[in-house]
Image: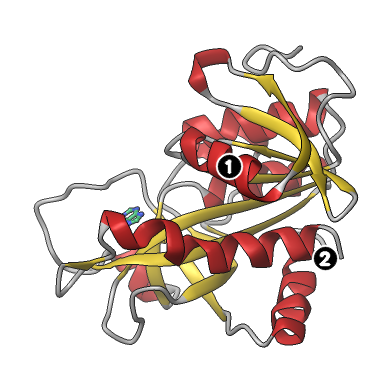
Amino acid sequence: MSVHIAAAKGQIAKTVLQPGDPLRAKFIADNYLDSVKLVSQTRNIFYYTGTYKGNEITIGASGMGIPSIGIYSYELYTEYGVDTIIRIGTCGAYSTDLNLFDVINVENAASESTYAKYAWGIEEELIPHQGNIFESINQTAAGLGKTVIESNIHTSDIFYRKDAAVPAIAQKHKCLAVEMEAFALFANAKYLGKSAATLLTVSDIIPTREQISSDEREKALRVMIELALESAVK
Ligand code: HPA
């Protein structure tokens, strides 16, 4: 076990799908995996290992925000020998160029966060996806006839803010949307020489306040979940 994950060594697969929400991890495990075992539930952050189309895979949550995914992804890579993490999350669109339910494969994550600098001496405010999994996702999507938008996104520590303007860093790097984790995942993977991608479904359009309703959420996320699973076992 590691500090925050109770699984024994060997109980986590080499590839991990990482939603933010532990109940989404449970949903994926219940609906898509065979021979599933709950391998950690420390702090109610569930990790399930099972098989998808015969391939071993782990689905486990990151929690919300840079500190949380910073901890879980680091322990997965360093304590459990994980090679690849695919974050699967939601994002808010900064403009009406995106639509609800669009799926983004993140090219680079831009952030004002000091996480990468103080953890690993990585000074850049823009960190790319790591390894080959980004390209694998694009190829898998093309093969399945699913559309993914390749884009930079903003990883922010802030969900609620007084100013409605698109933050300067997001404008500078042409970020179409905002979420709260990809930058730390990419920073950890970069430092450790591992693979990492982030798939995001647009769950809200910030300027119009349109949102995916809770009823629609489960169905909406299936496109991204299935793409992530297929890419993971390709
Ligand atoms: N901000 C940050 N993260 C998010 C948002 C948002 O508006 N929507 C979904 N994830």
Q: Which mark is residue 132?
A: 2
Q: Specify the amino acid type for callout 1.
A: Ala
Q: Residue at x 69, y 31 (%)?
A: 48
Q: Which class describes the residues within 10 Å of circle 1: few (<14), some (14-19), or many (20+)?
A: many
Residue 21: x %, y % from top left? 46, 39
Q: Specify the amino acid type for callout 2.
A: Asn
Structural distance between the alpha carbons of marks 1 and 2: 21 Å
Residue 121: x %, y % from top left? 65, 40
Q: Which residue is mark 1?
A: 116
If the picture is divided into quarters, which one holds ligand 1? bottom left
In the image, residue 234 above or below residue 24 = below
Residue 184 appears in the picture as rendered: yes
In the image, residue 75 above or below residue 62 = above
Residue 128 appears in the picture as rendered: no
Quadrant, the N terminus: top right
Residue 206: x %, y % from top left? 21, 68
Query: Of callouts 1 and 2, which one flags the residue occurring earlier in the amino acid sequence?
Result: 1
Quadrant, the C terminus: bottom right
Q: Residue at x 58, y 85 (%)?
A: 147
Closest to the observer, 216 or 192 = 216
Q: Which class describes the residues within 10 Å of circle 2: few (<14), some (14-19), or many (20+)?
A: few
Q: Which mark is residue 30?
A: none
Element under disc 2: loop
Element under disc 1: helix
Query: As drawn, is 186 to the left or to the right of 214?
Result: right
Residue 133: x %, y % from top left? 78, 63
Q: Residue 73 occupies which quadrant of the picture?
A: top right
Q: Nearer the viewer, mark 1 or mark 2?
A: 2
